Image (tube, coloured by chain):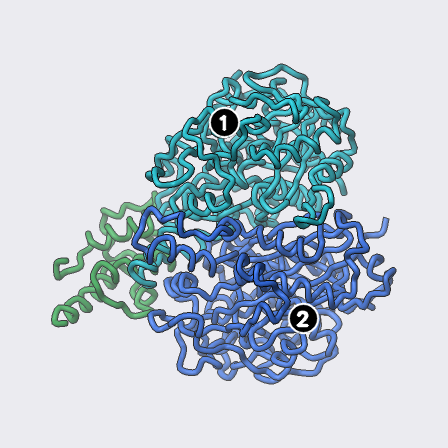
Chain colours: A blue, B green, C cyan
Amino acid sequence: MTARRVAITGIDVLAPGGTGVEAFWSLLSEGRTATRAITFFDPAPFRSRVAAEIDFDPEAHGLSPQEVRRMDRAAQFAVVAARGAVADSGVDLAAHDPHRIGVAIGSAVGATMGLDAEYRVVSDGGRLDLVDHRYAVPHLYDYLVPSSFAAEVAWAVGAEGPCTVVSTGCTSGIDSVGYAVDLIREGSADVMVAGSSDAPISPITMACFDAIKATTPRHDRPERASRPFDGTRNGFVLGEGAAFFVLEEFEHARRRGARIHAEIAGYATRSNAYHMTGLRPDGAEMAEAIRVALDEARMAPTAIDYVNAHGSGTKQNDRHETAAFKRSLGDHAYRTPVSSIKSMVGHSLGAIGSIEIAASVLAMAHNVVPPTANLHTPDPECDLDYVPIVARERRTDAVLTVGSGFGGFQSAMVLARPERGAV
Amino acid sequence: MSGEFTLDDLKRILRAAAGADESVDLDGDIADASFEALGYESLALLETGSRIEQEYGIVLRDDLLTVEETPRGLIDSVNAHLSGAVST
Amino acid sequence: MNTPVVVTGLGVVSPNGLGAADYWAATLVGKSGLSRITRFDPSQYPARLAGEIHGFAAEEHLPSRLLPQTDRMTRLALVAADWALADAGVSTAERPAFEMGVITASASGGFEFGQNELRKLWSRGGQYVSAYQSFAWFYAVNSGQISIRHGLKGPSGVVVSDQAGGLDAVAQARRQIRKGTPLIVSGGVDASLCPWGWVAQTAGGRLSTSDEPSRAYLPFDSAARGHVPGEGGAILIMEDLAAARARGARVYGEVAGYGATFDPRPGSGRAPGLRKAIELALADADTGPAAVDLVFADAAALPELDRSEAAALCAVFGARGVPVTAPKTMTGRLYSGAAPLDLATAFLAMREGIIPPTVNVEAAAEHRLDLVTRQTRDAELRTVLVLARGHGGFNSAMVLRSARDTDPPVANERKTHVR
């Protein structure tokens, strides 16, 4: 029995700085940043006042007024991006057995915006301990349990196979796609609509990251606030967004003559079992995830042409990750371009992993490595080639993308140009 | 609140903010022990710092809890803030 | 590749019993954990009954360093994981860290912790929000904390599919074991019995408004009028059968089959997906309806949902074709904790040869179910089907095989539970 392989045949991205794959890629390839002073609420009381917000008009993206009313912003992103990915793939899902179509959605914090806003209402601005149910919106249960996102997407695309939300903090965006890959490989589905979405730019999120000083307090020049791998970095910039994919079993995609964007060649996740927010400096567990993902892809470290880093821009992360790359890729870590698109689109928690998979696929499609914006001051402890400021042309046939999250999760995925190897 | 921040105040806030490691006797001679040796990592100290700020109405330096590595150092810093804050 | 995956340890935290032994003893005598809410004053709310866990003192079980940073749900999950590992006889410190993982289900995260921080945010200001809020409420917290407490560095994960998630997590654990990790801690524990969680659950319109615990949660009864929510769940130790045998582990039974579907979008006119999920799970277990000795029902207790579940069971097994039970009538619906608790109950039932009852229910004739009501029924149980559905249309089904029917068979001498 030959192993089932998994192809990406459809992509859509909703990211700060412009929605859709084209706008997303121009932002990245031009090295522009989409971080700005927060406009969703008055950020003055907060330590961190900058975010990467999306100018999102749900109705312009085809959502009905009813859908807009019942869905949290993150669910809206998910439905729009899932529909976009299906359209991009050209697959006629209605012609397929719906039980062979599944949905896997990553989200770290679910309906945070909706919950924050609704709590304020039912508690009368925090005055009531016994919050008042009479002021609750009827769909509050769908905010409580974010599997509602998977339900909305399943309805939107007509999936009746295995559907779920994968919520592993900031690795959710890789893990949801990895979950979908496993389902296709084992034969539980032929098509998976997979991706992730988060819309966390809300007072409660700002406050909780303020409390651990994880987000940057730099707000004099918002467009320069996110500085992964730079010696002056002092925290991440919160973002929002979604990226979705249509994943198909390879033969399924070939039979219908689909354009194959990339193959998902390997995936693994490991835990540091160390600390809910802290990282051990040696990067051993992320390195192990990378090693297993490469092994699954049957690739040597030298096959990797580009590393799409987690690169959140906290002091701790960027060192941890640099150590993990050296540990897993050896000398090749020094010869491979490594960059963080969080410098441009911020850190959208559970969504960013999928957005970074999209960036990785686009890097292969264009043979261009996106840069790390705002990287002007070297950090002696981050001594790899981080592609500062300007995108770089480079033949890119295989990309490693990684994520690291609260809870200790470390995930790695290897993406490859589809022509690679015999099918 | 009284004008001075004492070791007992710190121990009370540490216990509430982060509990206490079973292998450590907080009531022993801990003033010059490192927070790390007492079983408190950065997250516990951030929560502790935040509770001190709330209770005493002061704002500590962002990096204070990484700079001050012992209860004595932290207590001295808090008291320096408090003596400054008295006049406001 | 399809190595048998077995369960070797159970950790139960349930409204009618703490620990598998207490829970099983309570379940056999039909002891209910449903009562008027005591955690807060429920008078002003339309629903006032819940399955609360009483007598759980986290400080007796967990280090004080963990308490300020954990929601009740996480404390319960940590203790259940401790018990499950002890029950399995696993010493995690003595095993390679990358060869153990943790995959749990969640529904609403640490909602009470989140409630308290939201209250501080809106009543006092953002600077009053706890440093622990960044993770204590999120859906991944139980997996993260269990992994840290026991040094589990292997594949981890968290799935959220409302009440179906409990089976989806266990299926994902089985998947990871088959990919080469010999041991995964799995299951789910949920607890959101706080005013904010209560209001959010109330908004679904599916809670029973009865004030009489014995008349409030009546699945498949003509008086079915919604469910009573509860808190708790179960953590299971799952292992590769060969690895479990190699260390001489006591085996409860095998997770033999799994299937998951999603209902068609409302108004599509297509059939709901539960029947298909059952068929997929049976096929995955390489068995058929005739082999199934017992079904643990999802038991939504809303007339429409009861009808659709009964219809799926009748379609697969025939009218009154298989005994069906819902011990969750004693605990309330535990969201992501419900199905793992049903799995634990099923393994205990198989070992003891006893079907636990569906309490308080008079099965409505229209459902054509052989519902085991009032009291236990003795039966040889070799294959059991567990069903779980999540709000919105999630359907999951899991087939379990008894320890003596795992292939190859395993010794099963260590009986530790009371009769």
Crowding at dot 2, Cα within 10 Å, few <14 / some 14-19 / many 20+, comes out as many
Q: Which residue is at a point 46% across and 53% down the rendered structure image?
A: A137
> Is A336 above or below relative to A171?
below
Q: Nearer the viewer, residue C255 or C161?
A: C161
Q: What secondary structure is marked by label 1?
A: helix
Q: Nearer the viewer, residue A274 or B1?
A: B1
Q: What secondary structure is marked by label 2?
A: helix
What is the number of the mark on residue C330?
1
Location of residue C378 (image quadrant): top right
Q: Chain of mark 2?
A: A
Distance from Cα at disc 2 to Cα at disc 1: 51 Å
Q: Are marks 2 and 1 on the same chain?
A: no
What is the number of the mark on residue C196?
none
> Is C22 above or below relative to C4?
above
Residue C203 placement (x, y as % from top left): 47, 46
Left or right: where B32 falls relative to A300: left
What is the number of the mark on residue A360?
2
Residue C169 placement (x, y as % from top left): 61, 43
